[in-house]
Amino acid sequence: MERLSEKIKKSEVRAAARLMRLIENEEPSADDILKELYPSTGNAYVIGITGLPGSGKSTLIDALIKDYINKGKSLGVIAVDPSSPFTGGSILGDRVRMQQHSIEDDVFIKSLPTKGWKGGISKVTSKMITVMDSMGKDIVIVETAGVGQTEVEVKELAHTTVVVLVGGLGDSIQIIKAGILEIADIFVINKSEKNEFALDLESDLNDLFSLDSSREIKQGNWRPLVFKTEALNGKGLSELTTGIEKHKEFIINKGLFKSYFIKKSKKDLMQAIMDDIGLEVANRLEKKDQYKKMLAELENKDTDPFSLAKKIVNKILTKD
Amino acid sequence: MERLSEKIKKSEVRAAARLMRLIENEEPSADDILKELYPSTGNAYVIGITGLPGSGKSTLIDALIKDYINKGKSLGVIAVDPSSPFTGGSILGDRVRMQQHSIEDDVFIKSLPTKGWKGGISKVTSKMITVMDSMGKDIVIVETAGVGQTEVEVKELAHTTVVVLVGGLGDSIQIIKAGILEIADIFVINKSEKNEFALDLESDLNDLFSLDSSREIKQGNWRPLVFKTEALNGKGLSELTTGIEKHKEFIINKGLFKSYFIKKSKKDLMQAIMDDIGLEVANRLEKKDQYKKMLAELENKDTDPFSLAKKIVNKILTKD
């Protein structure tokens, strides 16, 4: 029988879905298959799209998908957003606009539930990207919701990060406080049609980027682009897709495409190391008498977590 | 000179703020002070309040604070929400309602920026709770925004978790998908006055909880309470605070208060162990030739992150 990894590399949807289920259940056997896929990865272009629920991310992604399909590209979408219509779960009868793009249409959509992922959501997202990449998807879109930890983590996995905002009181404040200035390559001000604040927000953003000191210079000195869109009626969308292409060219021309892949591999490595060590440490703490005694000291407040950690690490790590 | 930890235990605000700054900057020296505080902790009651931006969390927290102050309790608030008015940063001139409760009023407010925290936001939140706990705060409120990873992580640090919803299309779907059913001890349906969906949401929630199988039995079999509030005009707030007290009594009567503290200590321990090991591993990968060679193999795709991780862990861990 053909190996699962071979089927995935041929872009067989059911094989990929099976591996994704293993990843989602955090089964160690998933890693054995990912190993075999690894040499076939590093080719997909990853676009992160983030914004609060209700900002219109999904409508924008919908438009992006159509655009890329017209250009003959194959796509994967990873929705790290429990409220995303892309999840297609249809619980309680939600109508899912996106169902028009089904698996057969060269768009592979995978949604990730929000839960206490071991090692964080970025670990499982990274593995899902690996699967879609090895399937030969040209573009992988990662959709995240909100202004939190997740966005910052997922940013590190994307070549291009698009932040979707809706103009309005407090938005500028939110951007600054949330550290979103640092993660965005492209800003989209959506629902700009009936929004008196859209213009303010646009000029605020442009003001901010004109202050060199306000933004960490990174990614080879890219100045974020700002687009106004009305996603529902399609206004501004072709400018946006052109903007994303522009950033993509920039990333490739600066040689950042390959360095991203190396960075991702190292991240995956570090994560795998820490996972393996974490399992082993938890196992020793639970099973070995010397460690069990130490835990009892902690419960009785005879020691504290920080001092005890040093003692345990000293026992667990080789000297060299 | 008096030690910083002694000053913090006397609830000196400037000393506590100094330690919090060290924690925020992820300075290792913070842990040395936390060590000294540790024996004085385990007394505060921690309430987690989560909900999307705009759900009215802050108004609810405002009301809770007033209520607890009236009852003679001291409070700490940790806002893990970049858009929270509690942050008081006043960037771009945002009016902060909450400033009426200043530090002098026995409410200590600390906001945490969203960024790529090493080890996740829950680590730093846990440390902030330790500081406020050792200051002798009776109640620590942790405010988080959204429907993400953060909420699930922070849940593990709270004795009582309150989820704030606004009735409306898609809310029920959101609850189920986001795994929020599992984290909430108390649901609040806020802005219920002018919202035709509030009633639907209330009955949906009550229906869900009447199905035993729909909810993991945990926390000694607590059935989540559902409250309707109109935070802005104060309606339903006294019922809510009574509900929180009811859950608090439940936690204490079932002996869960102490077991939470032990769980938190073990989590802090595991986190500290993994932090120490992570630093050491990163250091070896960067400095030692044998590991540098391995990394080069990864870059050239001669190996994959998962196989390499096994090899490295084998070298790094003692056999026993």
Image (tube, coloured by chain):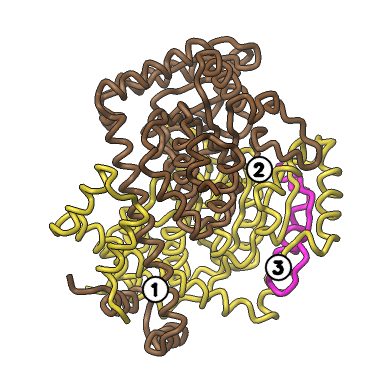
Chain colours: A yellow, B brown
Q: Are marks 1 and 3 on the same chain?
A: no
Chain assignment, label 2: A
Q: Earlier in the sequence, mark 2 or mark 3?
A: 2
Marked residue chain, label 3: A
Residue type for callout 3: Glu
In the image, residue B107 lies at what x, y percent?
58, 28
Whole-angstrom CA distance, mark 2 to mark 3, is: 21 Å
Disc number lying in front (1 or 2): 1
Which residue was labeled with disc 3?
Answer: A245
Per the image, the residue denoted by label 1 is B281
Is residue A225 highlighted in magenta?
yes
Q: Looking at the image, which residue sits at the far front?
A: B1
Give the secondary structure at mark 2: loop
Q: Residue drawn at (53%, 34%), measured in percent from left and top?
A: B11
What is the three-letter code of the residue carrying label 2? Answer: Gly
At label 1, counting other C-alpha atoms closer than 10 Å, the crowd grade (few under 14, some 14-19, many 20 or more) is: many
Magenta span? A218-244
Name the quadrant containing residue A20. bottom left
Does residue A139 appear left or right of residue B37 in this picture? right
A243 with respect to A317 (left or right): right
For this rendering, which residue is in front, A36 or A200? A200
Q: How many badges with numbers are in the image?
A: 3
> Badge 3 local density, few (<14 within 10 Å), some, or many (20+)?
few
Q: Is residue B224 visible?
A: yes
The chain letter under disc 1 is B
Quadrant, the C terminus of chain A: bottom left
> Which label is found at residue A56?
2
Q: Residue at x 52, y 74 (%)?
A: A263
